[in-house]
Image (cartoon, coloured by chain):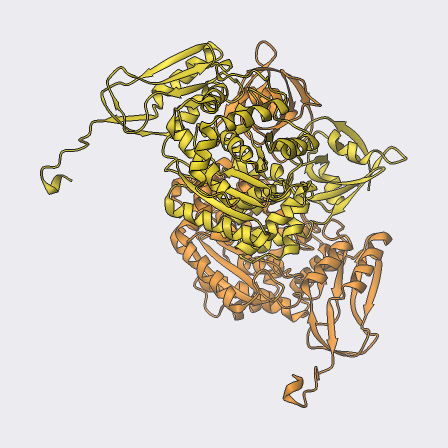
Chain colours: A yellow, B orange
Amino acid sequence: MKFKVREVNIRSSDPYITLSKADCVELGVKENDRVSITGERTTIAMVAYSDDIVEQGTAIIQSQIMKKTGLGKDGTVDIVYAHKPDSVRYVRKKMDGGKLTKEEIEAIVRDILENRMASIEISAWLTALHINGMDIAEIADFTMAMAKTGDIVKFSRSPVFDFHSLGGVPGNKITPIVISIVAAAGLMIPKTSSRAISSACGTSDFVETFCDVELSASKLMSISEEVGGVFAWGGSMNLAPVDDLVIKIEHPLGINPRAQMLASIMSKKVAMGSTHLLVDIPVGSEAKVATLEEGKVYARDLMDLGDRIGMHVECAITYADQPIGIAIGPNLEARECIAILEGEKHPSSVIEKACECAGMILEMAGIPNGFDKAKEILDSGEAYKKFMEIVVAQNGRPDLKSSDLQPGKYSYDLKAPNSGYVHAIHNKEVVFIAKTAGAPSDKGAGLMVMKKKGQRVEAGDVLMTIYAENEAKLKRAQEAAISNNPFEIEGMLLRRVTEVRTL
Amino acid sequence: MKFKVREVNIRSSDPYITLSKADCVELGVKENDRVSITGERTTIAMVAYSDDIVEQGTAIIQSQIMKKTGLGKDGTVDIVYAHKPDSVRYVRKKMDGGKLTKEEIEAIVRDILENRMASIEISAWLTALHINGMDIAEIADFTMAMAKTGDIVKFSRSPVFDFHSLGGVPGNKITPIVISIVAAAGLMIPKTSSRAISSACGTSDFVETFCDVELSASKLMSISEEVGGVFAWGGSMNLAPVDDLVIKIEHPLGINPRAQMLASIMSKKVAMGSTHLLVDIPVGSEAKVATLEEGKVYARDLMDLGDRIGMHVECAITYADQPIGIAIGPNLEARECIAILEGEKHPSSVIEKACECAGMILEMAGIPNGFDKAKEILDSGEAYKKFMEIVVAQNGRPDLKSSDLQPGKYSYDLKAPNSGYVHAIHNKEVVFIAKTAGAPSDKGAGLMVMKKKGQRVEAGDVLMTIYAENEAKLKRAQEAAISNNPFEIEGMLLRRVTEVRTL
């Protein structure tokens, strides 16, 4: 059927057109059905209907759709019912507990990428994945299908090392240290990182305080091959781009199905040409992975998956029951990270974790006593030298000092209400407070954790200092800290038990 | 944050506003997050972002949203991040296989009704229901929660009988016959029916060819109480309205979770004040229920559910491996239905099914030998008299004759390509052809099935006649019939087996 077009400029998750109810009946379409729209070219959109805003014979069409179709010669568009793509049947198969073939998985991934699947269908897909899961063979197919949706990098050097953290622990600023150590040992490790999704500060969020992270693909490749390491933002590469479309649905649903998570991580490594990968699996009651047992399951899956897609994978299951180091927030984490490279001996938790991870990568390359070797490279200043080479290659200042990076000028000290020992520091509250203070978009926002687990505190001691770039945000963060205090402080004696029946 | 408003008039499934990326970062919201918008009043919408169509400080907002909020005194609106409603956590609980409490189910139903749940969340909910299901206690809570979202009818007479078919079989025009027999026996049966969702013709689609079906609630009640029966369209009552919002998501996903289906049917019966209900469960390889065993499971669930919500429920599991009767399509089905009430003795499948169902309802009322009594009421003309009383009460012509209802003037005879026996008539193809011919919106469109299962046919015999109101649709239906012939015709000998190994 031919329709006159009224164009409107608005976005929504799915491309929508609005038709009168009578025209919908005539076309045989219901709300949320697909139609194919043909002007000069053809595209697909979803239907909404409303008699009170559109008359018969007219279609209200979003500009984003009209850009794809244009008008036909007579100034109208032709609209007809369009069938659901086959991928919707495969989603249904997963809902019904079926195992999907490589071709079916590829069809789903392609249809998500090319906007042929509607948001509600992607939501059904992720829910089915969350509930029914995938076996490792399916996840391997899923990984390769996702990798193929974007560019695949080919380096002239081999092996290609990589490092990834599952995340979920605040203050985890080890990546530039690990990369600098590994590259200083002569290996190539072209690391791409992400920005914060739900955390207070992703690696790219703090690295960009001292050098560029949005590198072109060719720049990333040349720095990697010449300097050995790079700290780039993954988003500047076209790596497994279908992932971004999926995150838009996962995030509001609050789910991250294991199959999707594994395929998402590994597809980007495949796209980056990685041959050897170390995965950091932080384990803690408030991390993504709660227990050691669960961490082992992830490790086995990642290594099995590596076997199937031809990548050597090892895992480091790490302690994540409190923040790593002291600093949280972009400038603060950058300062702590660079200070360690400059020779600072604290905080030891950051140094130890960085050297353990770097050491495992060195051992993958056949270098014995990895941890000791990594420590030696850090202590000797070789890692710092390599770090500065990378910074300069990424347009950072050649005279960069850790002290260049300063927190926001508004600060608040959260003090201990009573004496005792720090029994727990809740990561989720720490992240919430740092975000309320403005992290990661306000670079000076964040906090310094002054007391860690097990430490003795006296009433009135400073537990943490919150920083913000303006007074309003500091005030909000201060309120958040008071009502959601992340610190649990108690005496050594938690409860007196004098009779069994009082237990 | 304060925003200037640019209003646009377009619909989409969810209410959307468009902001610049910088404003999203400032507000701490991501795509598909919720924001609360306050002008004179407050409402919730979802966020999309686009730098190229909106500048910082401006929000593009759909008119449907602006109607709910209005502008603030200074001509702007205030937009802040809004948390997900609790119901999203309960959806997650169902995803994780949990059993929901009455309060959790009520929260989900209320948030769907009041547009607080986004489409992708409703999609996740339905997918979780499809996979993880609900037990009967949950379904009972779900039923009552859905019923409470709309009006609850209270009749002055009791008991209140009702009749419902799960559907999925074409040509099932028995409802007006059943209602007329039951009402002629002095019982009250205020039946509401639906229009076609995926079928070629719902009860309301053919009843409206001879009388009004969109009755006000008060008219429906007065006709029911005075005449005993009514053939109303359920949509004209405000019965469990949340169902309509769910169907918009179920339909494009192609799923109808059992818990949702049962609660949807039963909530409308609760809302109509039904005390005694007969459910027709058509069983056939292409019906909604494929096997007798599956039919028994539905019957047990419906009866258990009835027990829990205080309704007497019985079920008729019926044969549905081919169309019921001969006619498919609004005018054609109306003609066949009225002719039977006028005294016509064919097709016997329609008469038998109608009398079996009516008989079971009579027996629920304590009338013995239900089938015989129903047949007697039909044969004596009492059912016809009652039928005409109802028709006239619903503004139909007092001189209505079955012959008033005629098919479209364009027709095509599909002929048997070979001789043999009709081994199968595929319902799905029959429905597809009738819809292609224009049913149910073109009242004269449809088809007449001239040969039924088991009948002998000679090559060239007419298998079915397709009718349409215009030539183009007839041509399309004709092509559909040729490429998707619903008839399987073979000899009595299907395969010669002379040696076991050839099997």
Viewed as shown, does residue A137 lie left or right of A434? right
Q: Nearer the viewer, residue A337 or B246?
A: A337
Q: How many marks?
A: 0
Residue B452 occupies which quadrant of the picture? bottom right
Q: Position of residue B430 (x, y in %)?
A: 72, 62
Q: Position of residue A437 (x, y in %)?
A: 46, 18
Percent coordinates x, y for residue B422 in the rendering: 72, 75
Compared to residue A304, the image places residue A117 above or below, namely: above
- The image quadrant where one finds the C terminus of chain B is bottom right
Looking at the image, residue B202 lies above or below residue A447:
below
User: What residue is at 80 percent from the left and 31 percent from the top?
Assistant: A5
Note whether B172 is above or below B83 in the view shown: below
Residue placed farthest to the right in the image? A73
Q: Quadrant of residue B432?
A: bottom right
Q: Residue furthest left?
A: A499
Q: Position of residue A375 (x, y in %)?
A: 43, 33
Quadrant of the snapshot with the N terminus of chain B? top right
Quadrant assignment, res A102: bottom right
Q: Residue at x 50, y 19 (%)?
A: A331
Of residues A111 and B416, the one drawn nearer to the viewer in this rendering: A111
Q: Please indicate whether residue B429 sits to the left or right of residue B308 in the image.
A: right
Instruction: Decide if residue A120 is in sight here.
Output: no
